[in-house]
Amino acid sequence: ARVICVTATVTKVDLSYNYIEDEGITHLADALKHNKSVSELLLYEVGSGDVGAEALAGALRVNATVTVINVLKNELTEEGAQKLVEVAESKHNQIKTLCGIADDTTAVDFGGWGLGPADAILLAFDLRVNATLTQLDLSCNYLFSEQSKGLVRSAWRHRGSGLKL
């Protein structure tokens, strides 16, 4: 995290699959408050929960360079995911994704990834801001609740077909 504070050349931080948990995310978030070069932050399956989400949300409120984030498949509750969405929405189109979906992507296969209700909240944000996605496979995940499925369906509805739950 200290390197991120002082370097101006690092633009992508990928800690995916490293179990850094809330403590690691908190240190990273502190560093991001001072960083002006990181634009991509990949934190897929790092074991972070709501404490990490709160720390990351705080950093994103003041950071003006991060545009791509992937926090899927962590230990977030729906409340923790919602905090990240609220910050992303308040950044007025600065943050393009919370799920790592590039803004020119047309198809994504998340089938069998083990995504849960918090991930549905993050995906709903991405679907609202990504205009190019036409195919999305979310089959064989843990999106059991009608609320989770409803969030995704609602964000997808203007695209017609191409959604597989």
Image: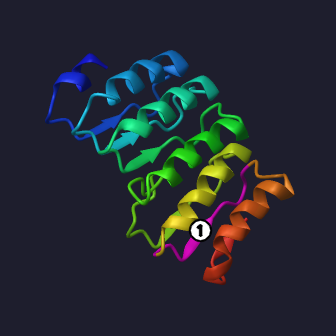
Is residue 110 visible in this depiction of the protein? Answer: no
Q: Position of residue 44 (x, y in %)?
A: 49, 38
In the depicted view, which residue is nearer to us: 110 or 78? 78
Which quadrant is home to the C terminus?
Answer: bottom right
- Total label count? 1
In magenta segment, residue 90? no
Question: Is residue 7 positioned above or below 61 on the image?
Answer: above
Q: Can residue 55 be seen in this snapshot? A: yes
Q: Amino acid at mark 1?
A: Leu
Give the position of the N terminus as an image quadrant: top left
Query: Which residue is at a point 14% across and 36% down the rendered structure image?
Result: 9
Which is more toward the observer, 17 or 38?
38
Residue that carries the numbered disc 1 in the rendered image = 136
Q: Main secondary structure of the magenta part?
A: loop
Magenta residues span 132-141
132 relative to 75, above or below: below
In-image side of 28 versus 163 (left or right): left
Per the image, label 1 sits on a secondary structure element best described as: strand
Above-or-below relation of 139 to 39:
below
The one nearer the camera, 5 or 152, is 5
Does residue 138 sit above or below 99 in this rendering?
below
Q: Position of residue 94 (x, y in %)?
A: 38, 55
What residue appears at the point 66 percent right and 46 percent down from the top-left corner? Answer: 115
- Left or right: residue 29 compared with residue 86: left
